[in-house]
Amino acid sequence: MVIIIVALLGGCAQTKEWWSSMRKSQSSSDETRILGAPRAEYYLNGLYELTTGDPATQAEIFAAAESGFKLAPRLQTNLRFGLVLATAGHPESNPEQAQTILRELLKQESLLTPAEISLATIYLKSAEEQSVLNAEARRLRASSSRAAQAESASTNRQLASAEAENQRLRQELDDAEAKLEAISSIERSIRAQDP
């Protein structure tokens, strides 16, 4: 009987711990909800439309985010614009500007919901990596351009050298033809004098 009572009390203690942890997680999610803050779906739906939309849709989403950022700057409008700038695949993508905006927002972490913090952190990391890739692409393009210019200069030098050689050979040919014509003229005059 004592064993049953101990088992029940142990089970009750575990149930009580489980119940209190559930209430804590529920209350902590309620406490982190900031009044007036949009849900994560608000941001995600816009980003989905931005990445899958046609150019007109992309321009419309960018214009709406930019006007919110410029005309009504708040944490949420700034976050939306930062996320739009950090999203690759549309003409207005700007990872460098996105990093600036998202870093500033993350300095005010206490005013953001956990979902907004997660989105800002994920997109900041993505923008940083995109910037590194863009810098590497620019470096490779510049290197390729320098190599192409060096190759073009080398080809131009070779062409100039070949042209100079052709000119020299033409001159030698002209000189040889002139000498040959002189010799032929001398031979004709000798034959004309020899009856």
Image: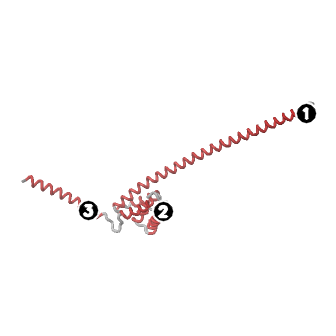
Residue to which mark 3 is pinned: 26
- Is the residue 60 above or below the residue 121 in the image? below
Q: Residue, x 63% and y 43% (percent of image)?
A: 155
Is 170 displayed left or right of 157 in the figure? right
Whichever of callouts 1 and 2 sits on the residue coming sooner in the sequence is: 2
Q: Residue, x 70% and y 42% (percent of image)?
A: 163
Residue to which mark 1 is pinned: 192
In the image, what residue type sits under mark 3? Answer: Gln
Residue 29: image x %, image y %? Answer: 29, 62
In the image, what residue type sits under mark 2? Answer: Pro
Q: Nearer the viewer, residue 117 or 134?
A: 134
Disc 3 to disc 1: CB gap under 8 Å: no
| Residue 55 - label | 2
CA gap, disc 3 and disc 1: 126 Å
**Crowding near pointer 1: few (<14 within 10 Å), some, many (20+)?**
few
Find the residue positioned furthest to the front: 195
Residue 161 lies in quadrant = top right
Residue 53: image x %, image y %? Answer: 44, 62
